[in-house]
Amino acid sequence: MRNSDAVVAVRAPASSANLGPGFDSFGLALALYDDVEMAAAPSGLQVDVTGEGAGEVPRDEQHLVVRAARAAFDLLGHQPPGLRLRGHNRVPHGRGLGSSAAAIVAGVVAARALVHLEEPGAVESLDDAAMLRLASELEGHPDNVAAALLGGFTTAWVSGSGVRAVRVEPAVTTVVLVPDSPVSTTVARGLLPAEVPHRDAVANSGRAALLPLALTTRPDLLFEATEDYLHQDYREPAMPESLSLVRRLRDDGHAAVISGAGPSVLVLCGAAHSDAAVSAKLVERLHGVAPGWQIKPMAVDREGTRTAG
């Protein structure tokens, strides 16, 4: 790949995985974004980061966007001699809102866009399905990366042909409650048991089957459809305040779940809550049960990761 003055700009959304019963399968893209600008350079690597986590992320080849881009360049057969990266992060790190998925998908999409500017035919080797496979390999599971890549509500799974995902248009809005302290995904996953009771698996299967219907055409079923039997309670030692908050909100009738591996809490609301007045009343009630938490009304992202320039 030759050096070029071209810069590609990529915007990648946050995401919430699991949504209660859909462990490692369901994802919902959220209208909160990380922005990345990437350009080829004659040599070296320059990484500039502002916003969320700016003081914590590496500025070398270990930066997650760079690692994802390098992997994509390798698959495309067009590794640039040098790279310049500028990022502005809005997705909180370590809060269960898909910050790593946003970084990975942004890196893969930006690399593909850069190669397309100089060698349009080369990108055929990295179509949407291949980007999903690569992003899932880098992330370790497909739920967040599918939502970040495609937008909307996604169901992802692994078959004999690899990782696959489908997207549907949800008819919901959300409120996200974010605590001050992060929780490591590795820690949260480490608390999960190797086996669960058969009755819990049966109950969870029913709720998981119900949730796509609730998200699209039957928001009156959101509360029941978001019941989980597989992972949330097991993670309580790592995030007791989050689980306590979920239970309090559900006792009040809200479809509240742990967002991804936590510790953020996601409240799924029917489309009526997109009305500003209704949403304001809901947020006011949430302030009463979650003092000290950031409370963010958040629309669903409909487009997924996109490029400009």
Image: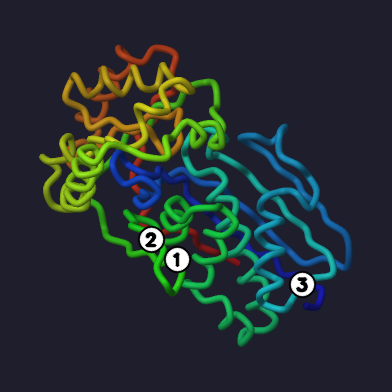
Residue shown at the point (27%, 20%) measured from the top left: 247
On residue 163, which mark appears?
1
Three-letter amino acid code of the residue under disc 3: Gln
Q: Reading the chain from its start, which is encountered first: label 1 or label 3? A: 3
Vertical side of 308 occupied by 300: above or below: above
Three-letter amino acid code of the residue under disc 2: Trp
Quadrant hosting residue 197? top left
Q: Reading the chain from its start, which is encountered first: label 1 or label 2? A: 2
**Left or right of 63 in this view: 214:** left
Q: Position of residue 159 (x, y in %)?
A: 39, 68
Three-letter amino acid code of the residue under disc 1: Val
* Mark 1 and mark 2: Cα distance apart in space: 6 Å
Are the residues tagged 2 and 3 within 8 Å (C-beta)?
Answer: no
Query: Is disc 2 placed on a helix, strand or loop?
Result: strand
- The residue wearing badge 3 is 79
Q: Position of residue 35 (x, y in %)?
A: 59, 50
Vertical side of 117 occupied by 275: above or below: above
Are the residues tagged 1 and 3 within 8 Å (C-beta)?
Answer: no
Quadrant hosting residue 44? bottom right
Who is closer to the viewer here, 220 or 51?
Answer: 220
Are the residues tagged 1 and 2 within 8 Å (C-beta)?
Answer: yes
Quadrant hosting residue 134? bottom right
Who is closer to the viewer here, 176 or 206?
Answer: 206
* Camera-side mark, 2 or 3: 2
Q: Reading the chain from its start, which is encountered first: label 2 or label 3? A: 3
